[in-house]
Every structure is written in structure tokens, then in C-alpha cells.
Image (cartoon, rainbow, N blue to C red):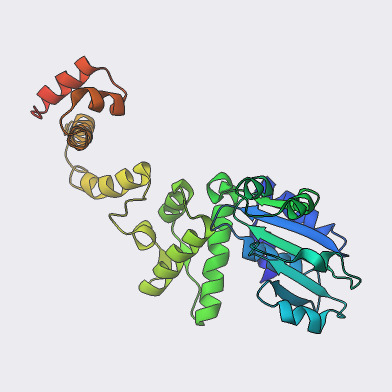
Amino acid sequence: MIADLIRAYKSPAMEEILENISKFSFENLIIFIYGERGTEKEDLIKIILSYIPHSKIIKLPEEYGKKKFLSGHDNLVYIVKNFENIDISFLYGDKPFRCAIFVSDTDHEQLYKKNAISFELYEILSKSHKLYLPPLKERKQDIIPLADFFLKEISEFLNLPNKELSTEAKGAILNHQWIENVSELKRYLVKAFILTRHKKLTLKDIFGEYNDRLSIKGFLELKLGNFLKDFANIENSNLYETVIQEVEKALLSLVFGEAEGNQVKTAKILGINRKTLYKKLKHYNLI
């Protein structure tokens, strides 16, 4: 599965990270993995460990006692996620280790400014091999291959036939903001996989019909799809004007209401001048 995961990464940023990992010499190596919450830091650790066969992992500070027990092992790997009051003396001991992996949601500069790490650890992280995971929305080349990989992973875990994404689902997934990054993508896919019986997952299977986080483009396409069926066989239906007016009226009504009837505030939110707003509100009988 690790090989499949590596193949799923198509973005230049991730390809560079993977190339750097493949060139590492794992001898007392210090690695600092950081990126937004929900980025695939755990998956990156798995990829790193795939280069160290038979590694013995010690999670610090949780398994500090285990450190003494395994300190003579040849393939020792330290993983540090909790920096509070961490004793970093293991980095300077006589016992060699393959690598020490420090993991954080923020970079070492921010950690130091927030007094979350000591100056000593700050200097160590400054000189470490830094692997920054960009947000998923900035790596669109990775989104669909990762989604396909996760669907395969889910099917194997549940021992069920694999499922695939429809064309419309792929488009919506690419346009989604993924605020919580890969962790959010996984949750959506697990839910859709479990709750559907058909093999091809649709946009509605992934996001639901009224999902608030659905992109504007995706939402309009979803709603207009059913609406257009009623006009398909009608000539001279004036469809363009009908759709534009309905969308504009709904937008004006929502923003005007959110602004509590304040026309100046409404105009600023919409990015139009007040006179234009007044004419439109009068046209749609909203004032």
C-alpha cells in the first residue's frame, strides 16, 4: 500500500518531498514534518519508515521508558509530536539512531514565538531536514489520485468491492476547499462508501444535496440539473433570463437580510454601488 500511496502523489511539491526522502541517509538524521492540521503527516511518517526495515519506534515523551530498553537497537526511530517539556538528550547520546522525526502543525519559527519550544530545540529544528506539507487545496494534482487510493484502502479494510468516483463527483472534489485537508477528504469518502450500495459514487453521495461546503459552481450545477429537465423540450423558454433573475433575487435577498436591511453594508458585501443595489431591490420587490 505504501508504494500505491507514493504513486498517488502527482503535485510538484509532493514529488520533491518524496525525492528528498529517497535520498536521505538514515544515520542520526533529524526530520521536521510540518503542515496544516489534517495534512497527511502520518502517511509521510509511514513512507519514511518504509526506507528503514525492521525499525523500532519510540514515541517521545510517551514512551520514554522504552527508550532505555531499546537504546542498543540498530534501527531506532524516535517520533516526537508533543514538544512540551521534551527531553532532547537522546539526540546527543552515545547510542546511534536511524532518525528522529519531529511533527507539528506549525513551523519552528511560530513554535518558538509562541514559547512552545526551547531555543535549543529551535536551533535543532532550524538545521533539520524540513518537509513542509502544503494544504490539499494547493495540490489539486493530488486530490483525485489520493481519493482513488483511499477508496481502494477502504474497500480492502472492509473486504468489499472497490468503488469509483463519477465525473461530476471528481469535479466537485477538485473544487472543494478542503479546510481540514486530507482528513476531511477521508471522512467524506468513508461515509459515502459505507452509505451507498452502487459502485460509482456521485456528487450527492459525497457531499449530500444541501452541503454548505459545496462550491458555488458545484451547488448551482447540482440544483440546475433538475431544473433544466423541465425546460428541455420547451422552445423559447427564455431560460437564461429566468435562471439569472432567480439566482440574483435569491442572492440579493440573502445578503440584504444578513445585513439587516442596511443598503450601504449590502452594497459593500456584493461589490456594487448603492444606486445599482437600490434599483435591483426595487425591481425584485425586496423593499
Q: In the rendering, at what x and y percent does residue 103 appear?
A: 66, 60
| Residue at position x 51%, y 75% in the image | 155
Visible in this render: residue 106? yes
Does residue 115 appear left or right of residue 211 in this picture?
right
Q: Is residue 59 above or below residue 30?
A: below
Q: Quadrant of residue 74?
A: bottom right
Query: Quadrant of the image for the N terminus?
Result: bottom right
Does residue 54 appear left or right of residue 27 in this picture?
left
Q: In the rendering, at what x and y percent does residue 110 appear?
A: 62, 46
| Residue at position x 51%, y 61% in the image | 183
Does residue 239 appear left or right of residue 27 in this picture?
left
Among all residues in the image, which is located at the extreme right? 94
| Residue at position x 79%, y 76% in the image | 55
Camera-side residue of 125 and 17: 125
Q: Is residue 13 above or below residue 148?
A: above
Camera-side residue of 28 and 170: 28
Q: In the rendering, at what x and y percent does residue 62 appear?
A: 65, 75
Among all residues in the image, which is located at the extreme top? 275
Q: In the rendering, at what x and y percent does residue 58 appear?
A: 73, 75
